[in-house]
Image: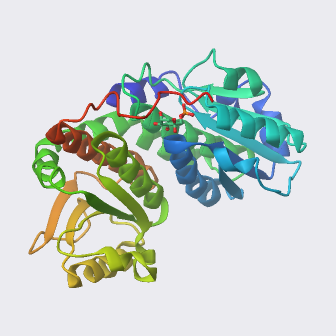
Amino acid sequence: QPRVIGDTLEGVTGIMPELFGDGAYNVFKQIDRVLILACGTSYYSGLTAKYWIESVAKIPVNVEIASEYRYRDSVPHPNTLVVTISQSGETADTLAALKHARSLGMEHTLTICNVGTSAMVRECKLAYITRAGVEVGVASTKAFTTQLAALFLLTLSLAQVNGRLTDAEEEQHLKAMRHLPVAISAVLALEPQIIAWSEDFARKENALFLGRGMHYPIALEGALKLKEISYIHAEAYPAGELKHGPLALVTEEMPVVTIAPNDALIEKLKSNMQEVRARGGQLYVFADVDSRITSGEGVHVIRLPEHYGLLSPILHVVSLQLLAYHSALARGTDVDKPRNLAKSVTV
Ligand code: F1P
């Protein structure tokens, strides 16, 4: 992961719309909203990008599950940038959603894709090819983090064209991105602690994942990874939703993975964690260096070494990928070829 993120940033000396293809500047100048279409893990990277684009570039973003999009009447808007995200570039539902968007008159299309020769790249006017290299396993991991890095670059490009990015801010964001390989290596170094947790998870049949704000999509991705490769039933919720239903599932048997970076939502999250503890739920908290959360009865804490601001989802997801991976190894499942799943779903 540190290497592919380093590869992503190689040669990126500044933010330029042309990173997304010739003519990107003119397209970005014309659009006033973004529609993201994707499936599975790629859908979750799109959900994360919604937080980034809306808060940094101030452009409204709609993220649609590609396998559903074409089956409902949506209201098209001509000045929309349609962004498809796909590791393989061959996912039939995402291609069909793209064609549907075009049939509704939305012609500004961009794909973020890991395969330069894929149908998705051929079908879209603009393309960004992620540099994840070959994903050995079916479950997307480094493809996801490189998608996030690409989507952050897209956020900055849109902000720049929209007059929302000063030179100083551009330099600050790029500096943070360039530090990502080191920061991810520090997360990978947490592996022994995560292995210790995975021994508990391997004995469970259910798990809940909680996140807030831009870490909610990361909670969704953590739950999906656990389901895909260890076959443990896992669901993710924005932590504030607990009291609207999922709290009924919490017992002493339920591990509750909580993504708890020290951001503006931390106090709200802490009260959600108390709701879990009051029902006996076992908290497994990925905090960061600054979040004032301590281990105790029923509260297990792993501390990520840095608080990483807007790029925090990229670090937190690596810890969740490791948790899924080691839980699967402990259960003896095939981490590269999960049952019933295919690398690209072309039908
Ligand atoms: C989408 C996806 C993957 C998942 C699995 C099935 O693929 O849902 O996220 O891990 O491989 O397909 P893609 O459009 O990103 O290639």
Q: Is residue 327 above or below residue 129?
A: below
In terms of depth relative to the viewer, which is nearer, 326 or 150? 326
Colour theme: rainbow
Q: Residue at x 22, y 85 (%)?
A: 278
Q: Is residue 84 left or right of residue 14?
A: right
In terms of depth relative to the viewer, which is nearer, 69 or 270? 69
Q: Residue at x 75, y 42 (%)?
A: 82
Location of residue 256 (image quadrant): bottom left
Q: Where is residue 208 drawn, in percent x and y?
A: 32, 63
Q: Where is residue 93 drawn, in percent x and y?
A: 66, 37
Q: Residue at x 61, y 46 (%)?
A: 155
Residue 162 visible in rendering: no
Q: Where is residue 253 drawn, in percent x and y?
A: 18, 69
Q: Where is residue 146 drawn, in percent x and y?
A: 47, 33
Residue 34 visible in rendering: yes
* Quarter of the image that includes the N terminus: top left
Q: How many marks?
A: 0
Which residue is farthest front?
340
Q: Is residue 88 above or below residue 323?
A: above
Q: Is residue 315 left or right of residue 31?
A: left
